[in-house]
Amino acid sequence: MEKKVRVRFAPSPTGGLHLGGVRTVLFNYLFAKKHGGDFIVRIEDTDQTRFVEGAEAYIFNTLAWCGLTPDESPLHGGPYAPYRQSERKASYKQYADQLVNAGFAYYAFDTPEDLEQMRAQYKTDENPSPQYNHLLRTKMRNSITLSEAEVAALLAAGTPHVVRIKMPLDETVSFTDMIRGEVSFNTSQVDDKVLLKADGMPTYHLAVVVDDYLMKITHAFRGEEWLPSAPVHILLWKYLGWSAEMPEWAHLPLILKPDGNGKLSKRDGDRLGFPVFAMDWTDPKTGEKTTGFKERGFLPQAFVNLLALLGWNDGTDNEVFTIDELIAAFSMERVHKGGAKFNYEKALWYNQEWIKRATAADLADQVAETLAAAGTTASNREVLLRVIDLVKERCTLMADFVTQGSFFFMSPSEFDTASIQPKWTDQKNMFFIELSKAFESSIVWEAHDLEKTFKEIAAAHDLKPGELMLPLRIMLVGGKFGPGVFDIAAIIGKEETVNRIQKVLSILEHN
């Protein structure tokens, strides 16, 4: 019988969630749903020195916004609780002791000063950053170099110590990566990683293996920056006797800077003017605020869609996918080995596509919130829906609905009369006076009828409609933008249309 697919995302609560992290969530989620499996979120908070208040809540808020709901997590519960590693602390020591007793790990009593001295003493031009490895472990203070009696005495005295894995000399550790194929490492190139810290907390290396085993994880997908740790983790699965239960691995490609030169960072976003976090994040220590895709005006469907296509495609030219379409099409075999360049212009294109495809009802609440934040109240929902349908093709970000839509709900505060004045004449002035009177007495207020009236009066004044459209647009909108002017007039109503025309005529008269 085939095992049920179980995948996990295991973030550290140390700050905002980079879009690379959300893509890791997405690929885990898509794989799980494709195979009828479970998606688990486990919080890796073993390094308490890096813990940041509010970061865990931020992670779950981000996943909720993206619609990527875990089946099991600290928030959602599940049969393998607790899902925070700090709450599982008691379970790790027995496995560290098991490794020491079997000769696969050892106690190290070196102080921070000892380690500093080691790095200074053994530093050479060829080896500028000496590591605690098979060469240097014999020169340090640990259960390999000390006698059994000395070790027992130090342990009995409660001397601070860590547990390190004893990496074997010159062995080859290989595994099959679902993206990269066969990957091999020489163990002599890997240092003796700490597995259990002096405070009894496990490091990531021990915790990830123990928890993946206990939570029956079948597939482990993570960023390629974790590849160098793979030999340590594979040996731990072997040393703990769990090789047969080891998950399949896939190391996802990096998301690169737009020029392809290195991993995309928050600094790149700050420098180039685009977000790299999913949602706004305020650092509780520094108060520094980082803008997210959500607050920049992205729809969650567009954000998820653009992330899916960063390093994956379905083999066709299709670029726009719903979440259900992504689940149906996704396979780890089609994830690229190489890094994916982030292109903000392409991200904007995705958002524009999703705004165009969305119904007015889908967008209404978010547009109303966006307008309200900019000081415009859109209390009439029916009008709001008509406005959204009229302007959404012109909107790339949610903020564009303010530019393209606020004048439907309140009179412009400024009018670009400078664009009217150079070609303004008494003849045009008389035309607009007559037009406002005709509009005022109109019984039917529909775009088609308003346009007909406009053209009839223009003909009577021997004026071309084309040279009158820009002044009318500026009178209604304030500037040279927006949808069809008669559609605008039909929505804002008779009284408001006439008032705006007369207001601009008054400004032109006094200039």
Image: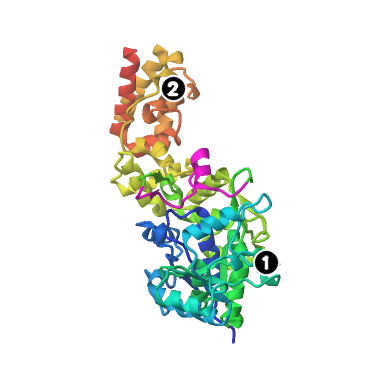
Residue at 57% x, 82% y: name it: 102
Please name whichever residue, 473 or 127, is drawn nearer the observer in this view of the structure. 127
The kind of residue on which mark 1 rests is Ser
- Count how many numbered circles sit on residues in the image: 2
Name the residue carrying label 2: 458
Q: Are marks 1 and 2 in contact (CB under 8 Å)?
A: no
* Residue at 48 percent of width and 24 percent of height: 465
Q: In the rendered structure, which amino acid carries the disc numbered 2? A: Ala
Above/below status of 353 relative to 419: below
Residue 89: x %, y % from top left? 41, 73
Residue shown at 55% from the left, 53% from the top: 306
Q: What stretch is highlighted in magenta?
A: 262-285
- For the stretch drawn in magenta, what is the main secondary structure? loop
Against 449, residue 397 (above or below) is below
Front one among 206 and 372? 206
Residue 287 visible in the snapshot? yes
